[in-house]
Amino acid sequence: MAKDYDPAMHTAEHILNQTMVRMFNKGRSFSNHIEKKKSKCDYHFDRMITAEETVEIELRVNDVIKSNQKVYEEFISKEEAAKKYNLSRLPDDSGDTLRIIRVGDYDACPCSGQHVTNTSEISSFKIISTDFNDGVLRVRFKLIDN
């Protein structure tokens, strides 16, 4: 794991991904880089998002953070997971049982990383920039103390 790995930032990335799915129905990020100071997620997209959409994403992510959602793991068979989740990014040696991380009733996805135990452990989410090139929307974000 990278030395700047941060469970709060990683959990915020899960919340951002689900927010993007709910708002735009384009899927979770296909690439990301998560560090304590700042992070980024790349999405297959067809346009740049508007300033209003950027504000709405921040509001929705922060609402989930403030809602004190329990973050926990469950284990299910790979066969069962394949019916519910996109498993294309899993390594070939992921095994027959997969770890699913749940952020309350807001998000669930296969993941091997570290997370907070409750969204209340995450500070405020802020998008610091976005750009769009060749069908890829990049969202850069950080966590800031209130």
Image: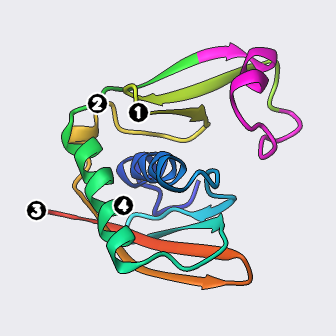
Q: For numbered disc 3, what is the local secondary structure? A: loop
Q: Which residue is mark 1?
A: 106
Q: Which residues are magenta?
A: 75-93
Residue at 21% x, 33% y is 68
* Badge 2 or badge 4: first in the primary sequence: 4
Q: Evaluate whether residue 123 shows in this view.
A: yes
- Asked if marks 3 and 2 touch (Cβ < 8 Å), the reply is no
Looking at the picture, which amino acid does disc 2 mark? Answer: Gln
Q: Amino acid at mark 3?
A: Asn
In three-dimensional space, the C-alpha distance between marks 2 and 4, rounded to whole angstroms, equals 18 Å
Whole-number angstrom distance, CA of label 1 to CA of label 2:
8 Å
Residue that carries the numbered disc 3 in the rendered image: 146
N-term mark: 1 or 4: 4
Label 3 neighbour load within 10 Å: few <14, some 14-19, many 20+ = few
Q: Is residue 49 left or right of residue 42?
A: left
Q: Position of residue 25 (x, y in %)?
A: 59, 51
Residue at (39, 64) in percent of width and height: 36
Residue farthest to the left, as pictured: 146
The quarter of the picture where residue 143 lies is bottom left
